[in-house]
């Protein structure tokens, strides 16, 4: 660590990018070993900020020193997470068009850290193995990150930034699989995973940083059983029944999972001063749910309040007019009235212009770049970004929106 000042170490650790956990594992030869998981989110180097590239490279350096020290101390080590670099050309959709792809300092760092799977004679032998490429050495289009702005995920226009790197011995002896889950949505990245043939040895006591030792939880919420109370046998149905307080029941059916009946939030209690003493506070018997359903079948104006809508004075007038019209016509089809009302409040979007390349409705975007056009709206092709030669990808259509 001599190459780092204390100040630099603090700066590198100050962004909360790494979480280390240690686990006792039993290998297939019944040996007990320590496994250290380094969950990490490596810095991204914005091209316009050279100081962040320096930060990123120092972060990589420190990560490697730490991982190698753990290996030297006898632990197995897995580094997993977003390393923010696509290692080889096969890991990036556009590597051919990127200048000096191989010269990127992040890629060089990975070259140095990793062994080439298969280990051809003369190839570099690093302490870690990219487990995905160990199992899928030649799979193309295997990406974990796509630009969310351009919709690039539709055409798999991405890169592989997320890895499960294991130390050489662990990957060779204990990894059974390593995979990407691109079908899992919810982020601009997708999950990655690996399967190991080791079992975990449970700890004899809770780790000292466990939540139950935090002062704010002292003596409360230690076990979920504390929320349950035993009751007498249910004689009629022959079920043993657990009851939460006085209204909601969880019935333990034979051969069936427990079923919670009635789950509606009781609004009068949700924000009350009673706090979270009792799980029952959040439940209401099913009879009142029936009541609510009945209300929903006869929609009326106050429903808007239930939706949390705040009306402007103008809208309130509109609402009253519609309500009056409904009363005057004495129509039974209040759904029509409801539809009319919402249409009068929400005008809906004006039709989109069609793009030049596909004659399809455009999407509207707003200029975010500082300058004379900041905040102006424009229309562009709605299709996802893809290779320029692919006619199914976004065309070059561009049109300023005229100010309304
Ligand atoms: Zn188009």
Image: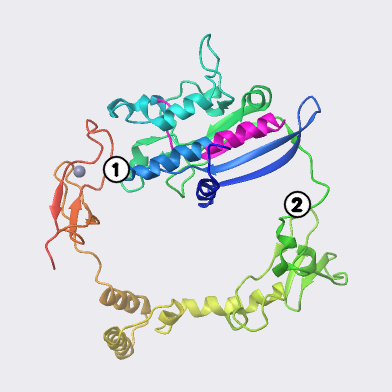
User: Is 96 positioned to the left or the right of 243 in the image?
Assistant: left
Please tell me whether residue 41 is drawn above or below residue 119 in the rendered image: below
Q: Is residue 26 above or below residue 17?
A: above
The residue beneath circle 2 is 207
Q: Which residue is depicted at the point 34% across and 37% down?
A: 155
Q: Which residue is mark 1?
A: 384
Question: 298 or 59: nearer the eye?
Answer: 59
Give percent across and percent down for residue 24. 76, 38
Does the image show residue 285?
no
Residue 182 covered by magenta stretch: no
Secondary element under disc 2, as helix, strand or loop, is: loop
| Residue occupying image coordinates x 78% and y 63% | 223
Residue 243 position in % (x across, y down): 78, 71
Q: Which numbered tag is attached to residue 198?
A: none
Quadrant housing residue 347: bottom left
Image quarter where the N terminus lies is top right
Q: Which residues are magenta?
A: 62-88
Q: Ligand 1 is located in which of the four quadrants?
A: top left
| The C terminus lies in quadrant | bottom left
Q: Nearer the viewer, mark 1 or mark 2?
A: 2
Number of on-image labels: 2
The tag earlier along the polypeptide, 1 or 2, is 2
- Residue positioned 50% across, 80% down in the render: 295
- Of 190 and 243, nearer the camera is 190
Question: Where residue 288 appears, x then y in whole percent?
Answer: 61, 79
- How many residues crowd around disc 2 within 10 Å: few (fewer than 14), some, or many (20 or more)? few
User: To which quarter of the image does residue 242 belong?
Assistant: bottom right
Cα–Cα span, label 1 and label 2: 47 Å
Could you tell me which secondary element the residue under label 1 belongs to?
loop
């Amino acid at each position: 660590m001599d190459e780092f000042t204390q100040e630099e170490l603090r700066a590198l650790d100050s962004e909360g990018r790494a979480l280390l956990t240690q686990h006792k594992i039993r290998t297939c030869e019944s040996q007990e070993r320590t496994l250290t998981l380094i969950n990490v989110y490596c810095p991204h180097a914005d091209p316009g900020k050279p100081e962040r590239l320096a930060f990123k490279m120092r972060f990589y350096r420190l990560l490697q020193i730490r991982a190698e020290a753990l290996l030297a101390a006898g632990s197995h080590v897995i580094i997993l997470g977003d390393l923010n670099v696509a290692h080889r050309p096969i890991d990036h959709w556009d590597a051919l068009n990127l200048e000096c792809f191989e010269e990127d300092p992040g890629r060089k760092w990975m070259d140095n850290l990793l062994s080439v799977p298969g280990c051809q004679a003369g190839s570099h032998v690093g302490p870690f193995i990219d487990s995905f490429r160990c199992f899928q050495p030649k799979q193309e289009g295997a990406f974990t990150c796509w630009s969310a702005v351009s919709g690039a995920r539709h055409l798999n226009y991405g890169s592989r930034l997320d890895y499960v790197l294991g130390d050489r011995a662990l990957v060779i002896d204990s990894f059974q699989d390593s995979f990407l889950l691109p079908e899992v949505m919810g982020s601009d990245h997708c999950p990655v995973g690996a399967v190991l043939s080791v079992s975990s040895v449970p700890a004899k006591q809770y780790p000292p940083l466990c939540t139950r030792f935090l002062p704010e939880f002292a003596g409360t919420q230690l076990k979920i059983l504390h929320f349950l109370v035993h009751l007498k046998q249910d004689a009629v149905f022959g079920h043993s029944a657990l009851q939460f307080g006085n209204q909601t029941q969880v019935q333990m059916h034979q051969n069936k999972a427990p079923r919670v009946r009635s789950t509606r939030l009781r609004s009068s209690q949700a924000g009350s001063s009673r706090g979270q003493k009792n799980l029952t506070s959040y439940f209401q018997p099913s009879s009142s749910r029936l009541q609510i359903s009945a209300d929903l079948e006869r929609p009326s104006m106050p429903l808007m309040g239930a939706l949390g809508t705040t009306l402007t004075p103008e809208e309130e007038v509109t609402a009253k007019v519609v309500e009056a019209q409904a009363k005057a016509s004495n129509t039974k089809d209040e759904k029509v009235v409801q539809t009319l009302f919402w249409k009068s409040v929400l005008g809906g979007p004006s039709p989109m212009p069609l793009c030049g390349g596909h004659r399809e409705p455009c999407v509207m975007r707003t200029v975010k770049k500082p300058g004379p056009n900041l905040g102006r709206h424009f229309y562009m092709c709605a299709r996802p970004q893809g290779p320029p030669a692919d006619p199914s990808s976004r065309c070059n259509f561009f049109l300023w929106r005229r100010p309304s």
